[in-house]
Image: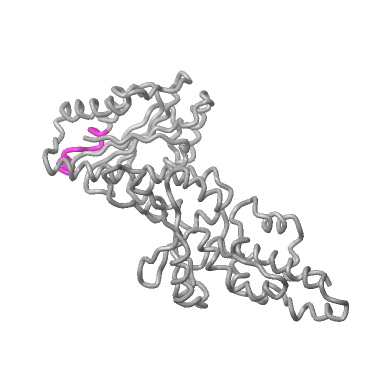
Amino acid sequence: MYCKILHGASFGGLINYINDPRKNAILVASSDGINLTNNQTITDSFVMQAGLSARNKKPVGHFILSFSPHDALRINDRMLEQIVNDYLKHMGYDDNQFVAFRHFDKEHPHVHIMVNRVNFKGKCTKDSHEKDKNIKVCKELTEQYGLFIARGKEAIKEGRLCSMDAIRYQMLHRVSESLQVSRSWKEFENELSKAGIRLRFRYNTKTNGIEGISFTLAKENISSKMKHDISYSGKQLDSSLTLACICKKLGNPIAIVHEQARDMYDDARQEWYDTHNAYEVRDIDRVFPDFDLRFPWQAQARMYNAPQMCGNEQTLGQDFFDELYQAADDVSYIGKGAIQVGLTSLGAILFPPYQPAIFAGGGGTSSKLGWGDDDKYKKKYSSRSRSFGRGRR
């Protein structure tokens, strides 16, 4: 038996993961007084209890108990309930809220325990020497319940299995918490960076479509023995972290770039108007036609919460992407016409169709794009009426 311990701040994000119907999750144990009707009522119960100790910024305890595949046939839900209760008691969490769900998505039996570190007395349970205590308790319970004790190569294999699961769960926590406190793509990228994680969009160079999102934890942030970075798609981490779900909160990248390009277009139109005489400005609607009619595919993006995977099939050409690959540090080829790009390079890819139109009145580049609330074009656009494509007459 082995246990990985994680601490976090979001009860809602964790319960949605450990009680995911797709994993055939089964409740095997829980403390008294929790409304188990659904994930929201469980979350509400934990949040209310955690409120008794407002100073505690990370009240969430996530304990992942993993067992050898050799124990799969003998471990039943009743035994897991007993092991969970014994484990929490030995770890000092016998006066705390908890729920424990068994998952069946791996070859080895394992159970996820969500614990409220704020106990029923309103005090935060101390976690000093928790790692050492955890090792001791796991060893004692393994012997007490007659569980399989891996030796030699088997121990190494099972240890790696558990540690890889733990890395995935740790990334899930970090990504979920970063998204929770972010209001824009730029804030999201910055929060992830603080956690040692980088985000990348999967972009199809053949169809011009944004096909997904992934998250990578650098090997330096995992272990000195780790030989490579660890990456998961948003969907692999959790159904709530797909590109479509994240876009519901942070916005459709194509629509964001379109609106910022619109403001550059309006600025260029105004500058052209101000620098031409009365006779010349009569031609302004020919020089600067309706913006949405000029870029119909991008304009339609406002109708969708997330980018359409099919794209618009107006590719930029291999030379463009080869040059981008050489110049940018957030681009990598992954095969079959697909690349992974960060926010900066995504802007560099989405902006070129607008450049000829904007250059007609003084220019604009993707470097002016902003993905955050501090972007001048986003602020300017949100403060005025949406009279699409119309400048000064």
Q: Position of residue 27 (x, y in %)?
A: 34, 38
Residue drawn at (42%, 48%) of the image: 197
User: Colour scheme used in the picture?
Assistant: one colour
**Based on the displayed image, in which of its 4 quarters is residue 305 positioned?**
bottom right
State which region is magenta. Answer: 69-80
Magenta stretch: residue 10 in it? no
Q: Is residue 118 above or below residue 359?
A: above
Choose between 159 and 61: the one closer to the eye: 159
Choose between 387 and 42: the one closer to the eye: 387
Q: Position of residue 9 (x, y in %)?
A: 47, 36
**Based on the displayed image, in which of its 4 quarters is residue 391 positioned?**
bottom right
**Which residue sits furthest top?**
121
Q: Position of residue 239 (x, y in %)?
A: 42, 53
Give the left or right position of residue 346, taking residue 202 as reference. right
- Quarter of the image containing the C terminus? bottom right
Q: Position of residue 314 (x, y in %)?
A: 52, 78
Give the left or right position of residue 271, taking residue 279 as reference. left
Residue drawn at (46%, 18%) of the image: 121
Magenta stretch: residue 79 in it? yes
